[in-house]
Amino acid sequence: MWLTFTGKSVIIRMKTEKLQSLFSFGQNDHRWGALLAFLCILHKRVGKAIGTEFQKVLEANNKTAKSFRKKEFLFNLISQEENKVKAKSTKRALLASLLSLAICISMLVGSTFAWFTDSVTSANNIIQSGNLDVELYYQVEGQTDWTKVTPSTNVFKAGALWEPGYTEVVKLKVVNEGSLALKYQLGVNIVNEIGSTNVNGTEFKLSDFIKYGIVDGDQDYTRETAVAAVDATANKLNVAYKSADPIQLLPKTAQNTDNEDIVTMVVYMPTTVGNDANHAKDAAVPTINLGINLFATQATVEADSFNNQYDASAPNFLPTGVSEDDFGTNVAYVNGNFYPNLKNALAAVHGNGADENIIYLKPGADLGEVTHAHVCSNLTVYGNGAFISGGEQDFEIGFPAASSTSCEGIKDDLTLNVYNLNGAAVWGSVTATLPYDINLNFVDCKDMTKVMLLKNGSTPSYKLNISIDNCTFKGTDAYRDSAIYCQNLGTLNVSNTTFENYAVGINQNNKDGVENYTLTNCVFVDCATASNVTTQTSYAAPVRAVASAAGTVTNLTLSNCKFVYTGTETAINGDILTFQEGNAGTVNLTKN
């Protein structure tokens, strides 16, 4: 028997011999009963189809026609009765099914399955904030207790009258009193000073005659041993002190009990000082307001799911007692005063006469347009994530003096430290020979545009040392020539820094003796491609090192640096371009 489905119709075909066998009498009567049961569940159309087949069988087998008609009559009778009942039974079946489903669901809700199960529940998942807390304490000679330093603290003896031979020893203790590791810097600088006139009628400042030195550890001295401990390296008080690099300090735990550092500061007036520091009776009393500053931020010690670098560039170095809210609409803070722009802050720096100054910028502030911000003396800028959004965006190393009314020009070695200031640049063009060292240090500065220091012809003019770490340089339509371009004897150390879309990333033209350039973990993206080179294609390269004067030697070392090209273009002169103009000098290239 075959069942063929066509649309909604069901056609059953049976071979004639099968029907003959099925409807024979006698021992096959049980097949008849089975067929009736089967037919009772079929549609009326099925019955008609089978009836037609029955008719064909009767014509083929006359011997069984009479009995077949009887059975056909019986079949039709049963089929009719089945059709009458079918409508009612369908409704009943539907109701019964819905009722059964409802019962099953109700039983399922309250049932307990016998499947194997297991579970783990943790109710001890604690999210707790860390605490960054640093304190500064001081102790003077002869005391055993430590006193907390506050913005109004005077660590020196009140009412003391300084004279040749006078000496004070102050111990400073930095304590990590929080739960997080921190890094700190300790600084000492003049906040303000009142000058005077000496008995010889000459103006003077007391800071020119008082010296100081700082020694690590908790030191016990006599007057003589205190002076002897620092005299060889002591600075005048007008030279600011800052610990060289941020110092890491762990919190106190059961495993770590060393959560403090101590330094000993010796301040004295040498016995060699004479009447040059002896103010006239009717002159102003020379006075120094000395600032002691402690800056602390997160250190890369604690780790999250990935590593311990999430606070690698933790910003916001502000002096003790100064908060972001204190700035108001101002953007800069220098020696106790707030300023509305960087230009005014630099004018204050140049006007106070100190040999080194610190500018603190408001965290995240927009400094607006900055063009040729002159720097003539040692300066540290804590950018705190502030950014320069317009102008040429540059600090100009102060030559010549005539180019700035507030800057008298460089008179000694100069160091410019810039931390976490975005959009900055450096520019300088020397027009006179200067026997000084220029040191430029940039850390955590993003979207820098250029560092360009030129020299005066072929005569060595000054020694330039550049250090750049964890910064980014990004070429723009306004400027994409060279990210770093210098011509002066010295060193260049660049690490963890990215250069993007420049004709030349590092462009060093050695014209003075031996120069050492070290690039570590730097990435150059789409530098020196045809799209980024508009002129002088012969020198375009992500890294270019040239020894262009007779006898010059350039030592270039690259360690773990990458050259990346995001499109189909690559550097038109290769990744690294080194050559000696006319075989004048030598370039030594080392790649690790």
Image (tube, rainbow, N blue to C red):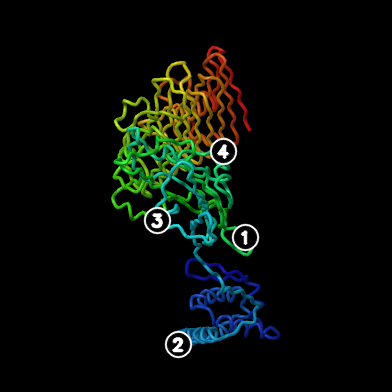
Q: What kind of residue is marked 1?
A: Asn
| Residue 339 shown left or right of residue 71 in the figure | left
| Residue 144 shown left or right of residue 431 in the figure | right
Q: Nearer the viewer, mark 1 or mark 4?
A: 1
Q: Report, in whole angstroms, how far the alpha carbon at label 3 lies from the one at label 1.
A: 30 Å
Q: Report, in whole angstroms, how far the alpha carbon at label 4 lies from the one at label 3.
A: 42 Å
| Residue 142 seen in the figure | yes
Q: Which residue is mark 2?
A: 88
Q: Nearer the viewer, mark 2 or mark 4?
A: 4
| Mark 4 neighbour class, 10 Å CA radius: few under 14, some 14 to 19, many 20 or more | some
Q: Nearer the viewer, mark 2 or mark 1?
A: 1
- In the image, is residue 577 above or below residue 248? above
Q: Which secondary structure lies at badge 2?
A: helix
Q: Which residue is mark 4?
A: 521
Q: What kind of residue is marked 3?
A: Pro
Image spot of residue 473 (x, y percent) = 45, 36
Q: What kind of residue is marked 2?
A: Lys
Q: Are marks 2 and 1 in contact (CB under 8 Å)?
A: no
| Mark 1 neighbour class, 10 Å CA radius: few under 14, some 14 to 19, many 20 or more | few
Q: Are marks 4 and 3 in contact (CB under 8 Å)?
A: no
Which of the pair 556/78 is nearer the observer? 556
Which of marks 4 and 1 precedes in the sequence? 1
| Mark 2 neighbour class, 10 Å CA radius: few under 14, some 14 to 19, many 20 or more | few
How many discs mark residues in the rendered view? 4
